[in-house]
Image (cartoon, rainbow, N blue to C red):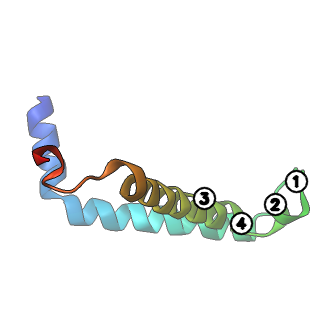
Amino acid sequence: MDLGKLLEALVQRGKLLRRIMYVVLAGLVIADIVIPSAYDRFPWESIGGFGAFYGFISCVLIIVVSKVLGYAFLYRSEDYYDD
């Protein structure tokens, strides 16, 4: 199959693929809650769904910190070079 046709087919079925991925992710979190971990190094790792929660919070924190750093040090006004 041609790569362009494959990508076009994926784009056309975007909503369906997104819903399937949400169901898969929810299933993984539920499985993490139901099935106990075999090896926990720390007590909080035995809490069901902790890895998903920690990963989500970490991603949000990375985005917020990068935005703050970008606004503080990188972004300049439109007339920055006109001075």
Which residue in the structure is indicated by mark 4? 50
Q: Earlier in the sequence, mark 4 or mark 3?
A: 4
Tell me, for residue 40, which label it has, or none: 1
Side of 73 where 34 appears, left or right = right
Vertically, is 18 above or below 10? below
Q: Residue furthest front?
A: 83
Query: SS for tag 2?
Result: helix
Report whether 28 appears left or right of 64. Answer: right
Q: Amino acid at mark 3?
A: Gly
The circle on residue 55 is: 3
**Local crowd at mark 2 within 10 Å, few (<14), some, or many (≥20)?**
some
According to the picture, the residue beneath numbered tag 2 turns out to be 45
Q: Residue at x 56, y 63 (%)?
A: 56
Kindly report which numbered mark, 2 or 3, lies closer to the viewer in this rendering.
3
Coordinates of residue 75 in the picture (x, y in percent): 30, 52
**Labels 1 and 2 touching (C-beta < 8 A):** yes
Left or right side of 43 for 3:
left
Residue 37, located in which quarter of the rendered image? Answer: bottom right
The Cα–Cα distance between marks 4 and 2, rounded to whole angstroms, is 6 Å
Q: Do callouts 4 and 1 mark residues in contact (Cβ within 8 Å)? A: no
- Give the crowd class for mark 3: few <14, some 14-19, many >=20 residues within 10 Å: few
Q: Position of residue 69 (x, y in %)?
A: 45, 54
Q: Position of residue 42 (x, y in %)?
A: 89, 56
* Res 68 → quadrant: bottom left
Tag 4 near tag 3, CB within 8 Å: no
Q: Amino acid at mark 4?
A: Phe
Which callout, 4 or 1, points at the residue further toward the start of the chain? Answer: 1
